[in-house]
Image: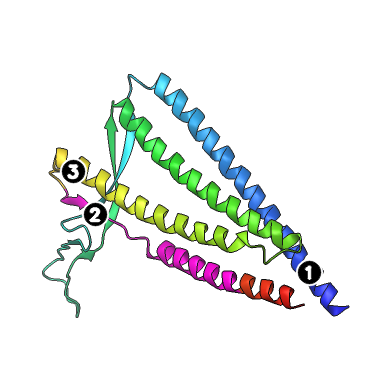
Amino acid sequence: MNESVRELERRGLARSLSVLLTALFFLIVAAGVLRVIGLSISALTDYDDGWEFDVPVAIFEGSFYPRLPVEVAEDTASAFLSKGISRGQGKWILHHYSLPIHVGGEAIHLLLYGALLWGITLLRRVLSTAAGGRPFDRLNPRRLNTLGWIILLSSALASTLQYLVSKWVLSGFEPASVPLSPSIDIHQEWILCGLLVMVLAAIWNEAVRMADDQSLTI
C-alpha cells in the first residue's frame, strides 16, 4: 500500500514538473516569435534611423583579468592602498546602419533560444516516461546525455561569439576615453551543469541496464 502511494506521488511530481516545463516551453516560443516580429518591423521601419548594437567589452587592458586604475586624493588618510578595479566588464552601446549586423545579432539570440527549447523538449520527454511509469526507459540516458552536450556546446558557443564580436568591433576603431579590450566570459556554472547532467546520464544508463537484467532474471 505504501509503495503504491509513493509511486503515485512520484508520478504526480513528474506530471507537475512536466506541466511547468510545458508552460516555460511555450513562453520561450512566444518570446522568440515576438523577437522575430520585432526584427521584421525594425528592419523595415528603422532602416534610415539605424539600430543599436551592444558589444560586450572588458574595461581597460586584458580580456581575462583587466584592472582599471583608480586614483584617490593624496590627502585621504586610509590604511588601504588603491590597486584599481579588477575584472570590470560592460556593454558598449553602438549605433550603426548595417542591416546584416542587425539581423545577425538577432539570429544569434534566436539560435540560443532554439538550443534552450531543444533542452526543454528532452526534459519533457524524460518526465513524460517517468509520469507514465517508465522511468528506466532506454532512451532517457541518451536524452540526458544529449542535454548535457547542448549545455556544454551552447556555453562554449556563447563565450566564443562574445569574444569574436568584441574583438572584431574593437579592431575597427579604438575608443579614446576609456581603454577597452575584447571581453571573454567563461560560463563555469553552465559548464559544470552540463558535466553534471552527463554524469547523471551515465548513472541513469547503468540503472537502466540493471533494471533490464532484473526483469530478465524474473
Q: Residue at x 41, y 63 (%)?
A: 191
Residue 178 percent across, percent down from the top left: 17, 49
Task: Specify the farthest residue to the right.
Answer: 1
- Dividing the picture into quadrants, the one containing residue 95 is top left
Q: What label sits on residue 145 in the rendered view?
A: none
Q: CA distance from mark 1 to mark 2?
A: 50 Å
Is 201 covered by the magenta stretch?
yes
Is 49 covered by the magenta stretch?
no
The part of the chain drawn in magenta is: 178-206
Disc on the earlier residue, 1 or 3: 1
Kind of residue at disc 3: Leu
Q: Is residue 196 depicted above or below 143 in this figure?
A: below
Q: What label sits on residue 9 in the rendered view?
A: 1
- Dividing the picture into quadrants, the one containing residue 143 is bottom right
Say few, some or many: other residues with alpha carbon within 10 Å of mark 3 (under 14 / 14 to 19 / 20 or more).
some
Disc on the earlier residue, 1 or 2: 1
Say few, some or many: other residues with alpha carbon within 10 Å of mark 1 (under 14 / 14 to 19 / 20 or more).
few
The quarter of the image holding the C terminus is bottom right
Q: Is residue 34 depicted above or below 22 in this figure?
A: above
The quarter of the image holding the N terminus is bottom right
Residue 157 percent across, percent down from the top left: 36, 51
Element on which disc 3 rests:
helix
Residue pointed to by mark 2? 58
Residue pointed to by mark 3? 170
Q: CA distance from mark 1 to mark 3?
A: 56 Å
Q: Nearer the viewer, mark 1 or mark 2?
A: 1
Q: CA distance from mark 3 to mark 2?
A: 11 Å
